[in-house]
Image (cartoon, coloured by chain):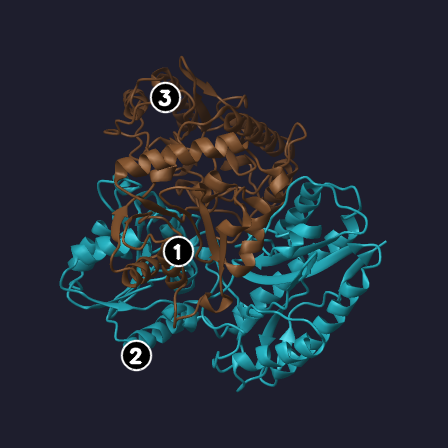
Chain colours: A cyan, B brown
Amino acid sequence: MSTLNLPFTPEEYDARLAKTRAAMNTAGCDVLVVTDPASMSWLTGYDGWSFYVHQAVIIGPSGDPLWWGRAMDALGARRTVYMPVDNIFGYEDTYVQNPDKHPMEDLAQLLAAQGWSGMRIGLEMDNYYFTAAAYMSLVQALPDAKWVNANVLVNWQRAIKSPTEIEYMRRAAKHVERMHATILERAEPGMKKNQLIADIYHAAIIGADGHWGDYPSIVPLAPSGADATAPHLTWDDSALKQGEATFFEIAGVYRRYHAPQSRTLFFGEPPAKYRAAEAAVLEAVAAGMEQAKPGNFAEDIANAFNATLNRLGFEKDSRCGYPIGLSYPPDWGEHTFSLRRHDKTVLEPGMTFHFMPALWLDDGGIEMTEPVLITPTGAENLCSTPSGLVVKD
Amino acid sequence: MSTLNLPFTPEEYDARLAKTRAAMNTAGCDVLVVTDPASMSWLTGYDGWSFYVHQAVIIGPSGDPLWWGRAMDALGARRTVYMPVDNIFGYEDTYVQNPDKHPMEDLAQLLAAQGWSGMRIGLEMDNYYFTAAAYMSLVQALPDAKWVNANVLVNWQRAIKSPTEIEYMRRAAKHVERMHATILERAEPGMKKNQLIADIYHAAIIGADGHWGDYPSIVPLAPSGADATAPHLTWDDSALKQGEATFFEIAGVYRRYHAPQSRTLFFGEPPAKYRAAEAAVLEAVAAGMEQAKPGNFAEDIANAFNATLNRLGFEKDSRCGYPIGLSYPPDWGEHTFSLRRHDKTVLEPGMTFHFMPALWLDDGGIEMTEPVLITPTGAENLCSTPSGLVVKD
């Protein structure tokens, strides 16, 4: 949490900036306003829970990025970004959640002061942290700018991970292995769900192999029984029950790098239908993994997965995966490609994704998912958690 | 996590809807598209970590609200909202994070099918979950609509809490008391920060008095030493140090209702400057609390607080509080009024706010903050955690 503790080398930040500028050039942007917290962090090192107010990293036609945000958070920027203090700009506190003015008016002044107000300016139009009001405010304040939709432009630059990023994800993968081991150790019929979640959180933050745990961009999803027909429910204090299944969609996190992995726990032998679903998913995942290699398309994984799954009598009508890496709430996905039909993204070594072959059946759900790395010759599961349903008697 | 387990009575949801419709009428909206997850939950009971994809609750001119979101999350809606299944609409999965189309095109079709496409439609223009692209997509798809900025319209309806909401916040307050007690018990010099955070999380999720803990909308903020000059840094595995201060900005949460409270921990006697800051903040808080009563303005609290603080030689240039209650990440504030100069919001019994008199000094920070309820005659601190700096030898 200080400039002495940047997660990456200056050379890596330089390379990221150069890569982003090349993409800006291709997209026709002279200036890029980056509001995605993960992209802000990836470009500058910035780290703090300040994305609930308007903030951005701005890449101009040359030079280091600028950090812009609430004045009190400029102090956090000073302690986390690599750029000199002259590149850090804080706006006055009365801009915060004030119906009479908008922080983007301040950003517009900053852009104008840099001489960029008539340039082609890229915006992340579909980012959580770039609201409709932010857009309207900026457009009104800078009438001479040409606006370019640069949504997920930086996210695409993040797709292929560096060796250090892969190392961080391997650490995160060890965390989630430990979290699943904790579930297996602690869960028992009669235990209240929140007690188990407390233990999972504890394991997550302790981490593994001496590497500390960071907070996940999505909290543990852990529905049981009929609630597991729905994918995104959290927890309460209901007791775990004999004969009931619970899925745990969780992630290990090291320095904001995520390794999500899910498993489904049964107390007692699962019904035949669930054993059939397990076998189908495992075979379909194996078919998908065979297509997970450089030069193939993202859709090749999905098509192989779905063909096998359908042949075995099951169906999944949602995408079966998405890229992962550095992220902040509310999502650990990178919002670029998806593992689904028609996605022609070419797989390259260093890409990482969450292979997400979840099935939500009429009376419950089954999730057995993996964090995967594309290698020079194929694909590697970053985790060694035993596959299949978890059965505890 | 089922319709049998709604957090509020049908009568309370009916009253909320009626109140919101009255506010829509005043604001000149026939239809309201609610994208704030807390407002969606407050209006319908909906609860799930699905706000990372586009979703909304829609209030039309009459009848129950509609829930609209990703098809897989419609299953979660069926299990958490009070409306009948006919009021729940799911969009196809290929809309998710697809540059070729936007989910708001599907919402536009739904609004048109209801016969609402030419009406005055309110939008939460500055909500995280209503992006610039969402707005552009909706406006393009419904050329006959009249658009109204209804930002925080529902949030204002949430300002005065019902007896059940206050009860939930009292439970959350007990959680955060327990979390601070855990810090005092466990923290010691040499302990790694993430180990302490793991213990805090464990206490938070276990809860207190038999009431389970939900996840907080902001993770624990816990910077030490010079990092505590910045307000929103999280944690790593640095060791806690003798002679160093750490502030803990944390919240207890019961069924999404938050009670945030901060304390600052010193190992060993704090320097004289921090004792002076402590005395000044406590006196200024007392002055502010005297103004916290029905009929006064929000700014009266801030003005009394700031006048006292300045007289005692300290300054705070940011707002000193904001309303709290039901929330989802990334913020536990309600985004309506602020405790700052010029805010003429009239205080009423049942309003709740986070009194946030944090000081960030040149070499560290001091946070001693409280969750407060406006009562018929004054104000009540929901927590009984001992006030002042926490000193552990």
SS type, badge 3: loop
In the image, is B146 to the left or to the right of B83?
Answer: left
Query: Which one is in front, B279 or A101?
Result: A101
Q: Amino acid at mark 2?
A: Thr
For mark 2, what is the residue?
Answer: A26
Alpha carbon distance from label 2 to label 1: 24 Å
Alpha carbon distance from label 1 to label 3: 33 Å
**Image spot of residue A264 (x, y percent):** 72, 59
**Image spot of residue B87 (x, y percent):** 49, 50
In the image, is B163 to the left or to the right of A52?
Answer: right
For mark 1, what is the residue?
Answer: A128
| Sequence order check, earlier mark of 2 and 1 | 2
Query: Which one is in front, B181 or A363?
Result: A363
Task: State which quadrant residue A218 falls in.
Answer: bottom right
Q: Amino acid at mark 1?
A: Tyr
SS type, badge 2: helix
Q: Amino acid at mark 3?
A: Glu
**Image spot of residue A66 (x, y percent):** 29, 59
**Residue B371 to residue A10: above or below:** above
For mark 3, what is the residue?
Answer: B348
In the image, is B378 to the left or to the right of B309?
Answer: right
Circle 3 chain: B
For discs 2 and 1, the disc positioned in front in the rendered view = 1
Which quarter shows the N terminus of chain B?
A: top right
**Image spot of residue A158 (x, y percent):** 45, 70
Alpha carbon distance from label 3 to label 2: 55 Å
